[in-house]
Image (tube, coloured by chain):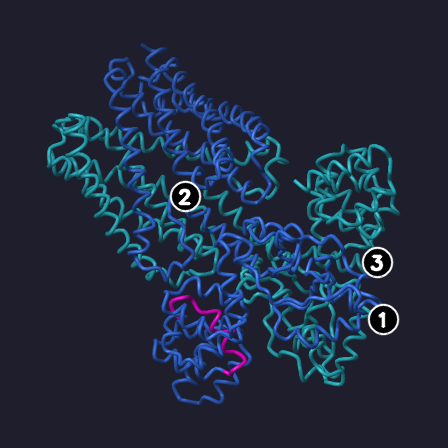
Chain colours: A cyan, B blue
Amino acid sequence: MEQEKTTEKLLELYKNRRFADLRMLLLDMESADIAAFAEEELDEKERLFFFRLLPKELASDVFVEFDSDTQEELIKAFTDKELKAVIDDMFLDDTVDIIDEMPANVVKRILLAADPDERKTINELLEYPDDSAGSLMTPEFVSLSANMTVSDAFDKIRRTGVNKETIYTCYVTDIRKRLIGVVTVKDLLLADKETLIEDIMTTNPVSIETLEDKEDVALKFQKYAYLALPVIDKEGCIVGIITVDDAVDVLQEEATEDIQIMAAITPDDKPYLKTSPFKIWLNRAPWLLILMVSATFTGLILNTYESALSALGAGTLLIACVPMLMDSGGNAGSQASVTVTRGIALGELKFKDIFRVQWKELRVGVLLALTLGAACFAKLLLIDNLLFGYSGYTAEVAFVISLCLAITVVLAKFVGCSLPLLAKKCKLDPAVMASPFITTIVDALSLILFCNVAIALLG
Amino acid sequence: MEQEKTTEKLLELYKNRRFADLRMLLLDMESADIAAFAEEELDEKERLFFFRLLPKELASDVFVEFDSDTQEELIKAFTDKELKAVIDDMFLDDTVDIIDEMPANVVKRILLAADPDERKTINELLEYPDDSAGSLMTPEFVSLSANMTVSDAFDKIRRTGVNKETIYTCYVTDIRKRLIGVVTVKDLLLADKETLIEDIMTTNPVSIETLEDKEDVALKFQKYAYLALPVIDKEGCIVGIITVDDAVDVLQEEATEDIQIMAAITPDDKPYLKTSPFKIWLNRAPWLLILMVSATFTGLILNTYESALSALGAGTLLIACVPMLMDSGGNAGSQASVTVTRGIALGELKFKDIFRVQWKELRVGVLLALTLGAACFAKLLLIDNLLFGYSGYTAEVAFVISLCLAITVVLAKFVGCSLPLLAKKCKLDPAVMASPFITTIVDALSLILFCNVAIALLG
């Protein structure tokens, strides 16, 4: 509600060219909201004009909040001087994130606009793989030495802090830049001015290696509730820090990615409304095609056994149960695989837990098999037979169907809990195993089982 | 690797009763890791003994990290004095979180152990609904007044900061405790000592209302990248703050919950390995039963049309295509509904976007329908007919099947993208709509469509 009012007010000031008032209002706003306003309410030309109106201290903060299409559009329209001003004011990790999304000619312009020193650092940061801690970090942190006093430390923070991504955690290094401790501004504030840093720093701080998977990094933030974590290279030297806001973004992106994969969609981190129908089609079509082809196999299996089943007394009744059997198996398998996949993503489950997981799922599977089997048996005999008058469901037929359902459930749970852990062990994405594939595998297994059991027991 | 070594070392020191060395090692460890060690490696009796060995300053930090079963077990074994020491050292939001999970008699002991003032605040905090901002907040923050100087502010922080959950953001209030601004320790450090707070504070700060949904709160943290946000009541008075670590937990819990619901599981935030098979059974069985019953409807529909379909020339071939049709429809629908559900959870999609979403899904649906329809047509005629020699698939039959597949896909996309938004509008959980139910609805729709189209065109 309030946001809509602000939007109206901004539009009104903009349309009436009351730019001084507009600036005043903008100074009181969050950069994320300003960026959203410019993207949603203004066209390309207006946006450039509006961006040039922004108070200088806000410009790069707002720029960072734009999505990459808008950023590209603006960079192409910027003069060299404008581009330099924006780049100079940004944190290096943000610059690197933007570069990652830009076409080559834009990247060239950005690098030319940066200072030589910055350019060197940017190029180093660009070398880290996309999914590594190195790609998230920024080298802009406060470093202290162990023999400084608290008041020296405050002097250094005051002198250099403006351009650091966080000043609240400071990193204590030796002369070879090796990380030897961590001290927070809280520690500093609560200590006496003449105290030496080495007396109040935390030694053996939690740290991250440059090539660590960024998902593991994000989980460390959740586990230890830190605001920032240091990144060290193989020699133990600190090369950068990662701040909690980047970790939050990673957690959200990874959850979205897992959810997309579980729903058989190629992951895409662009917001839905900004993705073109063609791109959405591209992310979805291959999976639907694969699953369509795999579903035909189930059809083939059904076809193969159809005549044999039909020859049995209750043939057509048996076939009518196939969707229920396959669906229940698929659902039971998905429950197990999705649970285990999420457990892996949260860092709760590792490959070494596979036997504990299987043993647990086996017990759950048996409980569920008894429940579903009994329910199915009762339903076939009481409801279908008595209410709907399908007189073909004898106790024997109902028993065979319920037995197959029970076995399918146990099997589905076992396969469903094992595959994601095996996938993780083989360095594949567990989420791929979590939903559509489990269903396909369990469908085929349950159908073969059902046909064979029915023919053996009722034939 | 390193963690395993630490565990071994801890166990060795503990077993050899070298408690002084054990304490030294513990002082260098993270409380989350200490808690994990005590839970995984020690039994109940050892755990109590081990907890009593912990250096006093670590005890409540470690206690907070335990899961609620362990907390309950320890509280029951504590003396009143021990309990009081732990409770006094905890932040109030943590105390409230623990109380939420305890049985009534344990709650009573905790409340008795707290100071009268604290008890009053705890009782107030317990009043807030579980999913509200109020349930996440802590009243332990630093408040300043506008006419203080920077050096006054530092004095106040030094005096009161030890027991505050964060000191890095301070809240400026008027005499009636209304929030009028925010100032960070960074602002304070970079300002001159004699500057007045009102000259450097940010007015109009982003804030949260006590009854705001905690999911929205978490999204605000992600959007604005804050370390803490103030919570205000209806009069605009600040009643507490929420810190980013709690927001991170909410984001993870909400994602897990959505994933569980999409996989037809009653949400449960207990770690998998700590949930009993019976509880897992309880979370899964009702959904499987509902889905099993609904799958029978599909079987009934199939049964109703079976004789009519069989009477057609290509009857059994048509029936063999049913699993493929139903699966493709279900998958296409899930893709749309899961995407939209995640968009809602990320705050990107609102009910007002429904027409934009439908229009986008309609276009995606048509593209996918053309792709899948063409692929299906080619597959039936070329592969099934020529390779497998199912001579029954004439061009006419293949066309009818492909046409139905195409219509099903468009329909599934449309229903799939609309239901989560409608659910949200009706204050239901969009995730419930996202997967199993969509599949059931689309299954029934596609089957009825298929049978009618086939009978009309081929009959």
Please name the residue that numbered disc 3 is placed on: A116
For badge 3, the amino acid type reads Pro
Report if the CB atoms under discs 3 and 2 are less than 8 Å apart: no
Asked if B354 appears above or below B59 in the picture, the reply is above
Within the magenta stretch, is there residue A148? Answer: no
Specify whether disc 1 shares its chain with disc 2.
no
Specify whether disc 3 shares its chain with disc 1.
no
Image location of residue B237, percent across then percent down: 65, 57
Mark 1 vs mark 2: give the one in front.
Answer: 1
* Magenta stretch, overall SS: helix
Please name the residue that numbered disc 2 is placed on: A435
Q: Examine the image and state in which quarter residue A320 appears.
A: top left
Please rate how many residues cluster around mark 3, counting C-alpha atoms within 10 Å: few if below 14, some from 14 to 19, many from 20: few
Image location of residue A241, percent across then percent down: 67, 64
Report if the CB atoms under discs 3 and 1 are less than 8 Å apart: no
Secondary structure under tag 3 reads helix
Please name the residue that numbered disc 1 is placed on: B194
